[in-house]
Amino acid sequence: MSKVTEKQNICTQLAMQCKAIQGIHMRDLFMHDKERGKKFSRQLSNLTIDYSKNLISTDILKLLFQFAKASDIETSIKAMFDGDKINVTENISVLHTALRSDVTQKLNIDGIDIIKQVHDELEKMQLFVNSIHNKNHKGWTGQPIDTFVNIGIGGSELGPKMVVDALTEYRQADTRSFFISNVDYQSIDDLQKMINPETTLFIISSKSFSTLETKTNADTLKEWMKESGCKEIEKHFIAVSNNLVAAKEFGINSENVFQIWDWVGGRFSLWSTIGLPIALAIGFDNFKTLLAGAHEMDEHFKQTSPEDNIPVILALIDYWYSNYFDAETHAFIPYDESLKLLPEYLSQLFMESNGKSANLSGHRIDYKTMPVTWGSVGTNSQHSFFQLLHQGTHTIPVDFLVPLTKKGNQKHHALLLANCFAQSQALMQGEDNSDPHKHFAGNKPSTTILYTELTPKTLGSLLAMFEHRTFVQGLLWQINSFDQWGVELGKKLATTIFENLNSQNIDEKLDSSTRNLIELYKKNQQ
């Protein structure tokens, strides 16, 4: 039997199981299986993943694992770790896992010792970070640096910003961090009011050193520094880029340009020198611990069979809802104020990776891929969109994240946990009421991700888990999770429109709507 035929047969059986389980309420599944909560949970170190409140059974999971096997999941996982060029549309390897590999590991690609390359750059990064924290690196007036401003966008901002915010408890004393991404000048105007140019370090994070928003913001801030009296720009600007020439032309010393490689995708890059803002904020030792947590999840993902493999299980459940329940969105709700920026980070990770409509062979596909990823922090979200989750008409799987331990007032933390656990229970069991307005149907799926406490190591494991989950989703949908051609067209057209905004005439080839918008702008400028 061919792989295609095998997968078709499995899909037919899954469709039948989907129809059957929709006639069963989850509360009955729990009633008939007192061990369901433990049976459908997996643990790694201080992470526990409870996926028992999902519309699944042992038979459904068995079929999903068969589908994973027929999709050659394990072969593809090995190929990624081995450095095969699995990013087929760009013909490059996908090596973000190498960024957190142990120095003793070996990985040679095209004659290059990747692990040595990574650790050499980490050592350079450590020396620079220590020079800042030891107050050896000083600004143009001789004052030590105490403020870090990252200038980047997309993966050069979302990951580092989220981690820095999440690990505030580990921040180096008397330092501050800011992130500038939007080309809207207001963000720079607001920033300039909050920082001292004499003690500020700017990190320009751009692989090409030509990203429009990043380059524009960097040029503007460079001019501001000069206007503030700075005559030694090189003391206040460093770069993470693979374009050494452009960085030097900007005025950055070559020893302060940190390398980023083509095989590091932006949304997978916080483990690399793109993580400089993280190391500057929390110290290099804590940054290394973050890497160690990710590496632990890498080893689990690489070595564990699908039946016990946390990222694989979660991805299979995602596939189940997207392709059999027509779930068009997926909510991520951290009951942890430290992770308030996580949903935005996950939106990029999942949707930029798997928001695709062509398969690995370049053919258009006729099935659902990535649902819209969104969310917000609990308990706030209970008072905004949870009405829709409980009584709306859409199937919306939810991931809850919550720490078992948190410093501070323990009454507050117990209330936080109680609310998180209550929401997952309410979504699952519902509540019957003869008044339709007060009836809760229940049977709403959710997964609960518990962690002992949010440490750099725990956060590293969590984020690596989401990365690998994303990869497996792509394998199940037969798409390339590591390109992002969909972002290119808008950038190209923006350049043309910018030229039209600044010229006397408007290109007649533009559509009437766009021409009208440009005309309105021009009239408003008069």
Image (cartoon, rainbow, N blue to C red):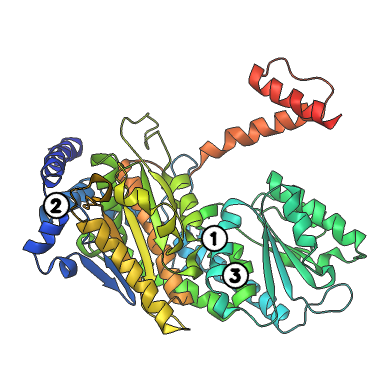
Secondary structure beneath disc 3? helix
Give the residue at the far front of this rendering. Answer: 435
Q: Is 8 displayed left or right of 81 in the figure?
A: left
The residue carrying mark 1 is 159
Say what amino acid the circle numbered 1 marks.
Answer: Gly
Residue 131, image x and y in percent?
A: 72, 80
Q: Is 253 displayed left or right of 492 in the figure?
A: right
Asked if residue 283 is positioned above or below residue 506 in the image, the reply reads below
Sequence-wise, the earlier of marks 3 and 2 is 2
Q: Dot 1: few (<14), some (14–19), or many (≥20) neighbours within 10 Å?
A: many
Secondary structure beneath disc 1? helix
Residue 46, image x and y in percent?
A: 34, 77
Say what amino acid the circle numbered 3 marks.
Answer: Ile
From the image, which quarter does the N terminus lie in? top left
Can residue 421 be seen by looking at this rendering?
yes
On residue 278, the disc is: 3
Question: Quadrant of residue 259 in the image?
Answer: bottom right
Q: Are marks 3 and 2 in contact (CB under 8 Å)?
A: no
Question: Quadrant of residue 501 in the image?
Answer: top right
Q: Is 383 displayed left or right of 489 in the figure?
A: left
Asked if residue 111 is positioned above or below residue 478 in the image, the reply reads below
Front-most of residues 301 and 56: 56
Frontmost of labels 3 and 2 is: 2
The residue carrying mark 2 is 25
Frontmost of labels 2 and 1 is: 2
Residue 430, image x and y in percent?
A: 22, 56
